[in-house]
Image: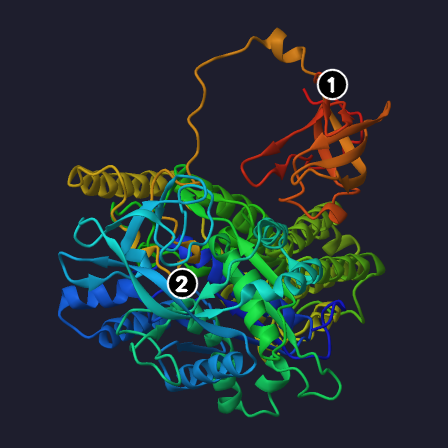
Amino acid sequence: MSHDDFPTDRPAVVTCGLPYANGDLHIGHLRTYVGGDVYSRALERLGQETAFVSGSDMHGTPVAVNAEQEGVSPEAFALDWHERYAETFPKFNVDFDNYGHTHDETNTEITQQLVRDLDEAGHLYEKEIMVAYDPVDDQYLPDRYVEGTCPYCGAHARGDECDEGCQRHLEPGEVEDPESTITGNPAEYRERTHKFFAVSEFADYLSDFLDRLEGTSNARNQPREWIEQGLQDWCITRDMDWGIDLPGENPQDLVLYVWVDAPIEYISSTKQYSERVGAGAFDWEAAWKEGVSDDHPEGGEIVHVIGRDIIQHHTIFWPAMLEATDHAEPRAVMASGFVTLGGKGFSTSRDRAVWADEYLDEGFHPDPLRYYLATNGGFQQDVDFSWEKFAERVNTELVGTVGNFLYRSLLFAHRNYEDGPDADAPSDEVAARIDEAVDEFAAAVNDYSVRALGDAVTDLARYGNEYIQRNEPWKLVDEEPAEAERVIYDCVALAKAIAVLFEPLAPEKSERLWAQLGESGTVHEATVEAAREGPTGDLSEPTELFEQVEDERVEDLNEKLEARVAESEDGDGDESDDDGSEADESAADENDDDTDDTDMTDIEPLSDDRISFDDFQELDIRVGRIEAAEGIEGADDLVKLTVDLGAETRTIVAGLKQLHDVSDLPDTKVIVLANMEKAELFGVESNGMVLAAGEEADLLTTYEDAGPGTKVK
């Protein structure tokens, strides 16, 4: 791993959290997989050697229980879902270099060897623990089928996580007042011998690792609290029949916890890719193992793209396993927010979701959804999906900005110049603007921002529309034909640059544009250097790339969705979501936010209490710029900010330490309630309030260039 700007000369691996082989995919799941695909393609456009891998998570209790209900083996049940996923991802142009699964021979072998390595290095030990047991049904209960009270905060909790309270990972036997979720019977704890991984030994390493970790700020900041609270060692075995067997002596026939073998699939899938293409094309060992490459002994560039509910596993358990077995540590973790529907979490049991197949069955092309999911908000922010918002983004940005520029330019070029306009190179102005777009694209990759990748393209198309409108080549054709040809050549050059830079977000539409431009080869192999080159092909008559979504269509889609959800809820008298089995104990569940409708993805209703306009006018809300930021000693959450408010500079205390990288805060523009009463917090006087949205403290800012001191009206 390096911290050099991409592209580097090391092999990169981009992974996505494994979908759990237990149910249909909806667009909430797709946000992570599209994000991973966009990012891996963008790396390749920069010239980075990249493998994009994932696989299906086959193990865990829900698979075993649901397979029994259907009268099939767990393997057959999970393989069926695995094959469906392998067919669905390409339909959305999510192009994994390898898509495996956790039950195959490769992952079984690598998992058991890694566990042996942990044991031989002295990082595993046996311990007698209390395991939940249903005495009426005469069965041991895997942790996901136990519910009770969290011993830390007193909230209702499931067996492996306090999902409704403090969000802590819970070890077997920790839940108080346990009950079986299978039978409803009170459970009792019985002593069993299990294997533990001594994660606590790696606390100092993990703290340093988080300092190095790149990606989204939530992936860096959330785990710090767990380390500060004290890491608990990790039980890596379970009382089940379905899973990868614990290697070595195993008198109780234990299997490995699903969270052991799930991330190891990242390594296994990369190995399978190397075996298919050859180590000369991609060397999985050079990417994943330390000491393999003489030039890069610390390994390659590993980037994990996940949902935010599995941050702990990817920033605590997984890097500890890698460090303990001489594997390369991740360079970055990109943790996405959830996708909600009308402010509520998707619910598979209530059919309150927009299903992946449903989107395609409606006749929509996959690329507009890719663009919407990648660019609608920052990657770590929640996105509330609606057909209205989808239509607005498609119509305004894809049709009105990108599509409008491409079609009008290429149509004019095709009609006025037989084989396309001729010039030696783009004008200095246009060449400089393309260079700027390429720089923005590269910066987006290094900032881990899939949204900024889209902005680089739409901003370039917006410039193209302004450029062609400003120069009016249709007026120049007769009076200044050479100048008209130069202008249109510039426009075709911009179109070529858009084709290259838009490929990660809209790969199929970009390939179609590449063909219209008459360029050789495929846009999927073009790097950003091709964006800087002028057009070389013979133009064909263009067709419009994107279709308008009409208001009537939106109304029809809303009616279908509302009717389907209402029908499902009418038949479900239980207000809680009964789909907890899909919110599994595995890597797959990163975007499956349907465990409970009252979880963190719910949006509070709007207040009925109103204030007058005069009351609002009394609020002195200003644009500020953070000049400096530092943590406050003794305060876990608080940061001391020095904020430029134009007329003066103030000290403001804000609870941002756990949610933002403090070193990234300087130069950030924020919105400040300037006439907030002063308050003293941990000995620091706070003179104002920085405004932020949601539990993730998404800092409010300005869209354009309002300077410090500008009043918000």
Determine the residue positioned at 45% across, 69% down: 196
Disc 2 designates what residue?
588
Q: Quick check: 116 above or below 350?
A: below
Determine the residue positioned at 23% across, 39% down: 563
Q: Residues within 10 Å of mark 1 (few under 14, many from 20)?
A: few
Q: How many marks?
A: 2
Residue 678, numbered circle: 1
Mark 1 or mark 2, whichever is nearer to me: 1
Q: Quadrant of residue 651?
A: top right
Name the element at disc 1. Answer: loop
The percent coordinates of residue 171 (x first, y second) are 41, 58
Image position of 99 (left or right of 294): left
The percent coordinates of residue 220 (x first, y second) are 63, 54
Image position of 44 (left or right of 680): left
Determine the residue positioned at 62% across, 82% down: 289
- Tag 2 or tag 1, which sits nearer the N-term? 2
Q: Amino acid at mark 2?
A: Ala
Question: For this rendering, which residue is in front, 287 or 379?
Answer: 287
Q: Amino acid at mark 1?
A: Lys
Name the element at disc 2. Answer: helix
Image position of 15 (left or right of 633): left
Colour scheme of the rendered structure: rainbow
